[in-house]
Amino acid sequence: MAQILWHNLNPEEIAKLLGTDLKGGLTEKAAKTRQREFGKNLLPEEKPLSRLRIFLEQFQSPLIYILIIAGIVTLILKEFTDSIVIFGAVILNTIVGYFQENKASRALRELKKVVKIEAQVLRAGNPKIIDSSELVPGDIFKVNAGNKVPADGRIIESHNLKINEMALTGEWLAAEKNPEIVLAETSLADRDNMVYMGTIVEAGIGKAIVTETGLGSQIGKVAQMVKETKEEKTPLQKKLANLSKIIGGVIGIICIFIFIEGVITGNSFLEMFTTSVAVAVAAIPEGLPVAMTVILALGMQRILKKKGLVRKLVSAETLGSTSVICSDKTATLTEGKIKVTKVLARKNKNLVSKIAILCNEAFVENPKAERAKWKLRGRPTDKALLFYGLEQGFRKAKLEKELPKIDEIPFDNQKKFLATLHKSKRGNILFVSGAPEKILEMSKMGDKERKKWEKELENVASQGFRTIALAIKITEKTKIADVVLQNLELAALLGLTDPLRKEVKGAIKICREAGMKPILVTGDHKLTAKTIAAEIGLKTKEENIMLAQDLDKLSDEEFEKRVKKIEVYARAEPRHKLRIIEAWQEKGEVVAMTGDGINDAPALKKADIGVALGSGTDVAKEASDLILLPDSFNIIVAAVEEGRAIIDNVRKVITYLLSDSFSEVILIGGALLSGFPLPILPAQILWVNLVEDGLPDIALAFEPKEKDLMKRKPQGQDVHLLTREMKAIIFIIGLITDLILLGLFFWLWKQNHDIAYVRTMIFACLTIDSLFYVFSCKSLRRNLWHINPFSNRILVAAVLIGVLVLVLAVYLPTLQTLLKTIPLGFNDWLIILGLGMIELILIEATKHYFIVRHQTGV
């Protein structure tokens, strides 16, 4: 089929070649047969990094290179014990890094599978929504503004159809599409009767017959040439990698000093070389970026369980800083179960029902099923109007035969109306459905009657109804573009209700407690918006509500002065969302904005967190950071909470790792400066950091979120990963640990104990201290006695394993030889545990000081 010039054939010829019906499409049976023949309509995905590649990448670290060099040097000098420990550390670090990164990679691949592109097809004459991967050659499909084209196809019907094909041709201007045959030699970019997979519908609607799917499509041929691609690191990962480099530079200088000082004071070159290497490796958190990826991936999975899909890894971090949430009303704050509950008819009610059914983009997917089992597809308002008309006893298929459609203008947020043109016995008849103010403006009536209907509109809107107006016009024209859209005859004013989601009031309350500002941005009438806003707990005084037309009259400077007071925007269009976002961002706020239409894409991109509705257009989803799978506002709040938990856990891991690093550097440096022998050997340092601390470090990534998370004020994006409190805790933990350990070392050394015994005591103390203070890192804002220390079972298990491994390191002969340890007595363990408890108490006292200062604002 690849050689057939589809653009040079008329639709009837193509239908014959593909064995399909232009009006009814394929049958389900034929579609299944073709899918077996042609396969799924899928593009080849970027190949994920192989397990071998992930494993080998763990060696791509300057620190690993240093370890390997150190291992080779010790091997040449026949220091086999040190060589075994160093190479063992390399292997262990590699294995831990591999499992962490592989798990994160798998988690992210699973997340990418969640959002699917849907396609509206005709199967056996009935419109149906299917996953685009199920499309086969010969299917008839429909595209609307905001859709991503699901397969290559030949256009058979179009109404103002414009498609942006930049992804394929590089041309940024949208191409106007029509069904007319073009010359065989026409280039791809000029084939105006074709649509191509992956391109975006900017305006209008159209129908096409699938000609190519998957790898046979134009974009599929390009995709075949794409080779394995490595994912870009997120900004957070880069920030952490940069932090590691800075710390590495500082530690490098310190280690050089330790090496020189050690040699000058009489220690052997080899011993000081391996010690410096060990300190360098121990002090630099080289596994931090990978650990952060795991935290982010786990956070994204938790958000997904709450029905929110974070499309970009870094957005999970940004979510935690959100301070302003701008949300639409329909489906987000409400259930999206819109129903026509009030009808003020100016014309015959039967005519009202016909307009509601025919001037409509919604449809029933299974019209032969019982009414209770009908599956209505389309925008919420369209579905409500369609259901109303069907409830009056009319059938869409019968009406479409009675009044065949000859042209239409799809709904647009800027025009605020939908129009369809039909043939009738009286000539052609135009049906229009849209915003009441717009329809009344276009309608023909006297001043007295107009005021009457405007008053009716206010009454209906003030009761919280969403309002829609229907109108008609008899015309001789055969295209809507030729019809003057004035002097319409108003047919009816409809009031639609959409119940608030039960959880919305609670979610709005949580927003306020969390220091966030919820804002309603809706296209509804001012009175409707005011009623809903009051019900959910927003401020509804005149100073708190702004009409979009009033916003247009304000300069940016004037708007910035008023923006803080505005909590409700009525009759807002997508373009107004941009101004709202910019005004808040100018004030340093982190803004989340919801949207669902193609015109919302610029605002979603501009917002710090673009939030697309699951029922929205593909364009909105592509531009977003977070997708609400069931459209609920509650998911945004839950996602922000998880984002805060992610930032919390990132800081806990950093604090834990850097405290450990600082302690070891100062311990060794202090001993050497004092003219004493090394208090702990290189092999023992590596053992503590890679074996003892490795599991607790990973376990902190699974730390459950703290209870007061949503009672804190949001932190701006400019707040550094290392806060003032963190720096103090890291410094003080290191200082306390070193004072205790150096004091113990000096005391034992002065008592003329064997050096192997002294080093074993320091080794055990350092390990126990590390395993104890990991519990202090469970919360940087609350003391240990205010939290449940056993809430993270994985952490408890990791610490218990660490204790067991320590006991083995002290008593197992093989490890004794490897680590140069000797058995300790009962009283020794009492000293070790006692010092661990003393250090824990001192650390908690330090935390308490900063907690009190934070609470009092000092």
Image: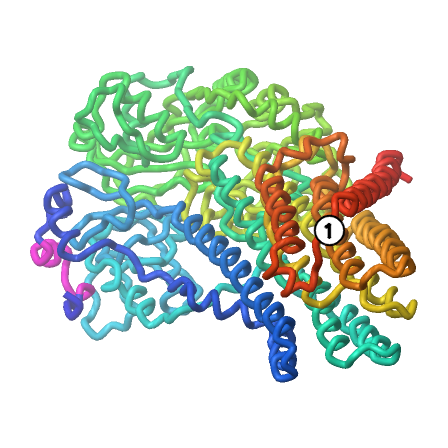
Q: Position of residue 29 (x, y in %)?
A: 11, 43
Q: In the rendered view, does 798 fall on the left or right side of 122? A: right
Say which of 638 and 299 sits in front.
Answer: 299
The residue at 63%/58% (across/down) is 288
Give the image location of residue 205, x and y in percent: 32, 47
**In the image, which residues are magenta?**
6-18
Residue at image location 48% in from the left, 66% down from the top? 55
* Residue 118, picture quadrant: top left
Q: Quarter of the image containing the N terminus?
A: bottom left
* Vertical comparison of 47 with 527: above or below: below
Q: Along the horizontal axis of the image, is 438 left or right of 130?
A: right
Tag 1's secondary structure? loop
> Who is closer to the viewer here, 701 or 515?
701
**Around disc 1, counting alpha carbons within 10 Å, would you say few (fewer than 14), some (14 to 19), or many (20 or more)?**
some
Please state, as top left, top right, bottom left or bottom right, where the C terminus lies in the image: top right
Q: Which residue appears farthest toward the bottom when viewing the image?
A: 76
Q: Find disc 1 in the rendering and name its residue.
A: 824
In-front residue for pair 128/671? 671
Whether residue 668 can be seen here: yes
Q: Residue 7: say if magenta.
A: yes
Magenta segment, prevailing SS (helix, strand or loop): helix
- Residue 151 image offset from top left, x and y in percent: 27, 56
Judge whether residue 482 is colored magenta: no
Q: Position of residue 807 (x, y in %)?
A: 65, 49
Q: How many marks?
A: 1
